[in-house]
C-alpha cells in the first residue's frame, strides 16, 4: 500500500536572509514542527524528501496566521526561492493523537453526511472563516463543503449542536440540521 501523506504547510515565499521560508499553515498544531522536526518536503510534481526543521516561529503583523520555518540545508534567499509552493508533509502514521471530539480534516473529507437517515452528500472540503487579513477566526464554526448527488454543493456548519455522530472508520457523519438550513444553501 502506498504511503499516505498529510500536508502541514505550503511555502509561500522566502522570509529572511538565512533561508527561512514563510508558509501557510494547514494544521492546528504548529508545535508539531518543534516536537517532531523530521518532516518531508514535497516540491511540485516530485516525491517527498526528508528534511529537518531547525527552527520555527509564528510571525505577527501581516503574516500572522502563518509560520516561518528554517529548514536544514536551506541557508540563503536563493535556496528558499527554490521551495516556492512546496508542501511540508508528514506520513499519516506520524500524526499526533487527537482527544475525543477532535478530528483531522483529512479524516472528514470523503465521509457521507446523513440528516435524519437521508443521505445529504459527501464531504469534499472544509472552509475555515477568516478575517480580511486572512487570519483564521478561531471562534467561528468551520463549514463542511458537501457535494450533493446532483453535483451541487452546500455549506453546513460544523457545530456541536448539529452533529449527532461522527464515525471516521465507517466514513459517516450524522447530523440534525435546523429546518430551512439546506434550502438557504441550495
Image (tube, helix red, strand yellow):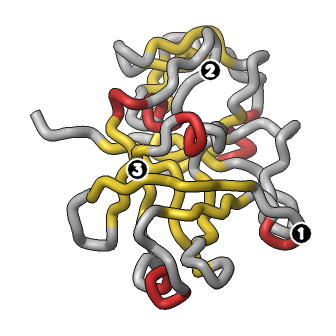
Q: Residue furthest left?
A: 1
Residue 136 horizontal/vertical position (percent): 78, 52
On the question of residue 24 being in view, the answer is yes
Residue ID at (67%, 15%): 176
Q: Say few, some or many: other residues with alpha carbon within 10 Å of mark 2 (under 14 / 14 to 19 / 20 or more).
A: few
Disc 2: which residue: 102
In this orientation, which residue lies closer to the viewer: 82 or 105? Answer: 82
Query: Closer to the observer: label 2 or label 1?
Result: 1
Residue ID at (85%, 72%): 62
Residue ID at (75%, 18%): 160
The Cα atoms of the two marked residues, 3 and 2, are separated by 20 Å
Q: Secondary structure at mark 2?
A: loop
Residue ID at (75%, 56%): 58
Residue 4 horizontal/vertical position (percent): 27, 39
Classify the position of the N terminus by image quarter: top left
Q: Say few, some or many: other residues with alpha carbon within 10 Å of mark 3 (under 14 / 14 to 19 / 20 or more).
A: many
Q: In the figure, residue 44 lies in which quadrant?
A: bottom left
In this orientation, which residue lies closer to the viewer: 79 or 115? Answer: 79
Q: Earlier in the sequence, mark 1 or mark 3?
A: 1
- Left or right position of 173 against 182: left
Q: Earlier in the sequence, mark 3 or mark 2?
A: 3
Residue 56 horizontal/vertical position (percent): 64, 55
In this orientation, which residue lies closer to the viewer: 55 or 147? Answer: 55
Disc 3: which residue: 89
When the figure is inspected, residue 185 is found, relative to residue 181, above or below; the finding is below
Q: In the figure, residue 168 lies in which quadrant?
A: top left
The Cα atoms of the two marked residues, 1 and 3, are separated by 26 Å
Q: Secondary structure at mark 1?
A: helix
In this orientation, which residue lies closer to the viewer: 108 or 99? Answer: 99
Query: Closer to the observer: label 3 or label 2?
Result: 3
The Cα atoms of the two marked residues, 2 and 1, are separated by 29 Å
Disc 1: which residue: 61
Amino acid at each position: 500500500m502506498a504511503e499516505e501523506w498529510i500536508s502541514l504547510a505550503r511555502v509561500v515565499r522566502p522570509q529572511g536572509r538565512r533561508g527561512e521560508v514563510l508558509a501557510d499553515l494547514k494544521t492546528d498544531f504548529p508545535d508539531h514542527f518543534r516536537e517532531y522536526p523530521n518532516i518531508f518536503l514535497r516540491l511540485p510534481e516530485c516525491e517527498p524528501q526528508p528534511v529537518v526543521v531547525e527552527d520555527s516561529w509564528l510571525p505577527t503583523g501581516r503574516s500572522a496566521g502563518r509560520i516561518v520555518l528554517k529548514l536544514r540545508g536551506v541557508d540563503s534567499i536563493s535556496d528558499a526561492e527554490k521551495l516556492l509552493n512546496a508542501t511540508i508533509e508528514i506520513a499519516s502514521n506520524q500524526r499526533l493523537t487527537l482527544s475525543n471530539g477532535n478530528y483531522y480534516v483529512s479524516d472528514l473529507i470523503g465521509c457521507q453526511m446523513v440528516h435524519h437517515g437521508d443521505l445529504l452528500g459527501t464531504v469534499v472540503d472544509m472552509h475555515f472563516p477568516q478575517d480580511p487579513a486572512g487570519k483564521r477566526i478561531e471562534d467561528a464554526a468551520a463549514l463542511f463543503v458537501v457535494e450533493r448527488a446532483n453535483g451541487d454543493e452546500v455549506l453546513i456548519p460544523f457545530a456541536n449542536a448539529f452533529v449527532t455522530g461522527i464515525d471516521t472508520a465507517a466514513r459517516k457523519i450524522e447530523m440534525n440540521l435546523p429546518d430551512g438550513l439546506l434550502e438557504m444553501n441550495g
